Amino acid sequence: MPTAHATRAEPTATEDAGPARHLAPHPATALPLTAALIVLALSYWTVDIVSPALPAISDSLGVSATGAGLIVAAFFGGRLVSNLPAAALTDRAGPRLTAAVGALVLGLGSIVAAFAHAETPFLVARALQGCGVALLATAGLLSVLRALPRGGAAMTAFNVSAGVGGSFGLYSSGWLTGSFGWRAIFWFSAALATIVFITTLVSHSIAARQRSPRPDLGRAVTAAPSPPSPLFGKMAIGAMLANLLVYANYAIWVVGLPLYAAVRFGAGTADIALLLLIINIIHLLGAFPVGGVIRLFGAQATMALGFASAALGIGATILAPNERWLLVPMALYAFGQVAGNSGSGDLLLRLGGDTGRGVAMVRLTSDIGMVVGPAAAGALVDAAGVTAPFIALAAISGIAAVASGAAARHALRPV
């Protein structure tokens, strides 16, 4: 049954009295929703702009498939180590200042990458870019969560804005690399970081919308148990593992597919950019129905659907007879990925409330996946060929689909 604190907003810092007042967290503020969505879109533009140019960068710097995986892993390694500091800074200083700092760091890393002529300084620059995007993603996502507290709404808005930015990144990558060389994408990323910085300067912080501290987590759960209930411990661990695997599966998109298309079908940068762009649009469009699926059936059932779709798509990719046929299994993969990350992300955000804790759980697990996944995918390509990452991740995703389905059925049992 709902307890008294389930129907009452959390006290603000000004309501606390006594000597501990100076320990109160920063009042819940947010970037305006429009500004937050712009910050997220432009940030993810700089993320996805690199993938189509990965073969060209690898050839220019003289790195192997493992090195190509590290180019991606270094970026997400920078995000990984910055996630918890980003969450702490956002809670203490607010999303506006956090986003401004993130834009400066992203711009610095982009400029260093544009000048780099060897693998080591380039990897350092990629890590700096990752640190900047971690700050921007945390500030942007927390602002969206505070503006759109309804179930599934925050992750839908996040996926749409990130998808739009990613689509522009993929399109611009092929054109910039083909016209000016791969270094142009990093000069362009520095320009985008400047626009983000200006956006944060001209935006004013707003008060967060009030929400119940622990809203409904699915059809079967009508009231959240008080911490430290084992339900929340198991649920949080399961959601974190699911989110980690979803983002490890993105190794197919950022490393596996570009290398596979280049080796198997001789695809160039423009061809790879177009292929990834179409897949990203499918991913973007899938975010809209997935938000409704979460509200109707719950986050865990949505995760099971996502893993099943991703497993089918990843496994069927190696059966495609030519480059065009890659779109069919990759459409299944794209829908599965948006269902998986929306389901696991929504669950983690709701367990964390409207503080940086929920965002930190999402960003931490996603970046662990994005470090491990691309590095492992590159190593598998070197060790066993370009099909190896597809076989391995299809099998793991199939197991995750079964586990998520079992958890969803358990959650729907009467209590």
Image: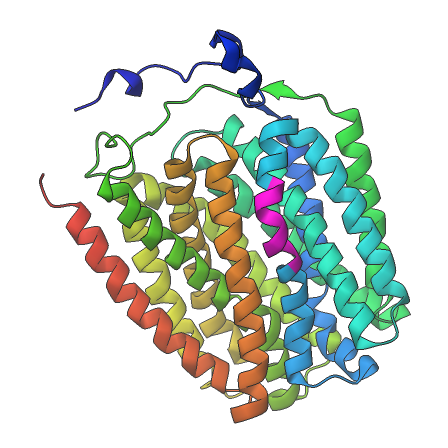
Residue 289 in the image: state x and y as whole percent: 40, 46
Q: Residue furthest bottom?
A: 384
Taking the image as shown, residue 336 lies to the left or right of residue 145, namely left
Q: Main secondary structure of the magenta part?
A: helix
Taking the image as shown, residue 227 lies to the left or right of residue 313, namely left
Q: Which residues are magenta?
A: 78-86
Residue 114 in the image: state x and y as whole percent: 87, 64
Residue 20 in the image: state x and y as whole percent: 50, 15
Taking the image as shown, residue 22 lies to the left or right of residue 219, namely right
Q: Nearer the viewer, residue 217 or 12?
A: 12
Q: In which quadrant of the rendered view does residue 136 lie? A: top right
Say if 22 sits above or below 63 in the image: above
Q: Nearer the viewer, residue 123 or 151?
A: 123
Residue 113 in the image: state x and y as whole percent: 83, 64
Q: Residue at x 61, y 74 (%)?
A: 255
Q: Can residue 304 be found in the magenta stretch?
A: no
Q: Can residue 84 be found in the magenta stretch?
A: yes
Report the quarter where the C terminus lies.
Answer: top left
